[in-house]
Amino acid sequence: MKDLPAELRPREKLLQRGPAALADSELLALLLRTGYKGRGVVALADDVLQACAGLAGLLNAAPAELKGIKGLGPAKRAELLAVMELARRALAQPLRAAPVFDAPGRVKDYLALHLGGRTQEVFAVLFLDAQHRLLQVEEMFQGTLNQTSVYPREVVRRALALNAGAVVLAHNHPSGVAEPSRADEFLTQSLKNALQLVDVRVLDHIVVGQGHVVSMAERGLI
């Protein structure tokens, strides 16, 4: 980066104009700090974003995925994984302190970060206490790009183990389209019926797409 004019260097640009002025690759370059021989740090940041299909994919990248990117040694991978986990925890913290539906946008933001970049379909459950504060988030089932097998008895078992009073269901659509399907509606009703037997309410089922999140409760589908 020393070869760039001072006003174009990401650090100086951030300090002078604020973080919003930086492109995704420039922000990532500040974390990576150095490139490798023949490849500057901004170019390396571009390579990482391209390999992960953007920031959403990077935030959900597995360690093995990062390991396959040239220029990311153990130290850089560890730092990226730490930053990603800090982002998730920062979004989850307010949900543990107050009822989740005091700020429903935070639930959507958290789930968009948690599930938005996945290339496989993932079914997650937010287990809540009697005051609807977050107890735990668990990814319970994973499937192929177009199908997930979800077992209501497993969700019921975990709800009882955690002494949950309510749940928010969530899954992603790797296709990028967040519209709930008829299968999603059927699954929601099956889980609602199963959890009702143990006095656990289903408050919502949130579907995460690419840059779009849909609440089935807001659609009147719960």
Image: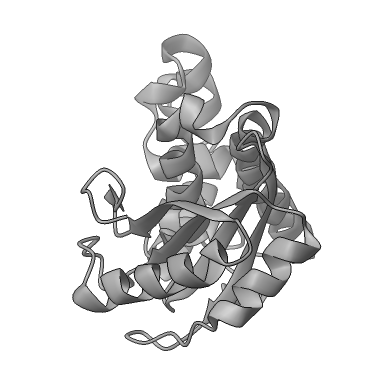
The location of residue 147, given as percent across then percent down, is 37, 87
Could you say which is closer to the camera, residue 15 or residue 84?
Answer: 84
- Residue 194 visible in this rendered orientation of the protein: yes
Return the residue nearer the eye: 45 or 222. Answer: 222
Identify the residue at horizontal 35%, vertical 58% (top origin): 208
In the rendered structure, the answer to whether residue 141 lies left or right of residue 25 reads right
* Horizontal and vertical percent position of residue 192: 45, 65
Q: From the viewer's perspective, is residue 133 above or below residue 190? A: above
> Left or right: where does residue 206 sit relative to residue 35?
left
Closer to the camera, 135 or 186?
186
Residue 108 image point, x, y percent: 41, 43
Quarter of the image where one finds residue 104: top left
Residue 66 showing in the rendered view: no
| Image quadrant occupied by the C terminus | bottom left
Residue in the picture at 60% in, 68% down: 139
Look at 52% across and 44% down and name the residue there.
Answer: 28
- Whole-percent x and y of residue 30? 58, 37
Front-lying residue, 5 or 145 = 145
Q: In this rendering, is residue 64 above or below 60?
A: below
User: How many marks do you count on the picture?
Assistant: 0
Vertical relation: 7 (above or below) 48 = above
Give the image's coloring scheme.
one colour
Give the residue at x 68% y 33%.
93
Q: Is residue 89 left or right of residue 4?
A: right
